[in-house]
Image (tube, rainbow, N blue to C red):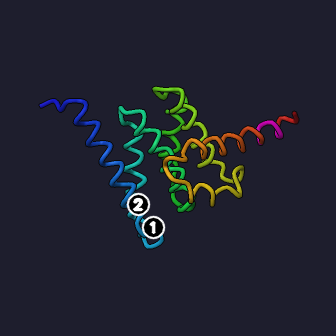
Amino acid sequence: MNTPFPIRLVASSLLLIFCGMAYSQSVERRPVRDIERIISIYRGSLENQNAGVVEATIFHLITVRTLFPEQDYRKVSKELSRLALAGVTPSIRFKSFVAVNYIQYPQLFEGIDDEIREAKIDQADQVFERLESRLSSYQVSSAGI
């Protein structure tokens, strides 16, 4: 049986919300295997058909990276790199590009982890703008301009 798109959209949105709620509750006490599972769920959400779900997932992955920098993000980085090149919307491509750079090169973004940790989902665009600004200033300074 083929499930109608609106039902799949609502179901996947609810899954993302519940994952975010589960993740946000007592993150300090989460065992590593729970964080790995959360990252895996978010990685799967990057394939969602709804652009808003994908963008929210990218934001949540950045937040998870600030809280758990020691985790293995290679699979997520690979998926974000793919989205940076072939994302459905320009916004997904931009946010994926910024996120993959943040995950792979955290030394370029020193000092802004606290801002990201404290940001709420409705401030996601400001977080991406801040990260992009830092990335752009690094690229300009390393190019000698």
In depth, the one of 7 and 107 nearer the eye is 7
* SS type, badge 1: helix
Residue at the (48%, 46%) spot, across then down: 76
Tell me, for residue 38, which label it has, or none: none
Give the side of residue 140 with respect to residue 78, left or right: right
Q: Position of residue 72 (x, y in %)?
A: 51, 55
Give amino acid for label 1.
Val
Tell me, for residue 27, which label it has, or none: 1
Q: Is residue 137 magenta?
A: no
Q: Quadrant of residue 22?
A: bottom left
Q: Position of residue 118 (x, y in %)?
A: 56, 59
**Crowd rating for badge 2 (residues with CA inside 10 Å; few <14, some 14–19, many 20+):** some
Q: Position of residue 27 (x, y in %)?
A: 45, 67
Q: Name the residue tied to disc 2.
A: 23
Chain part drawn in magenta: 138-142
Q: Could you tell me if the residues under marks 2 and 1 are in contact, i.e. CB atoms within 8 Å?
A: yes
In depth, the one of 145 and 53 nearer the eye is 53
Residue at the (37%, 33%) spot, across then down: 50
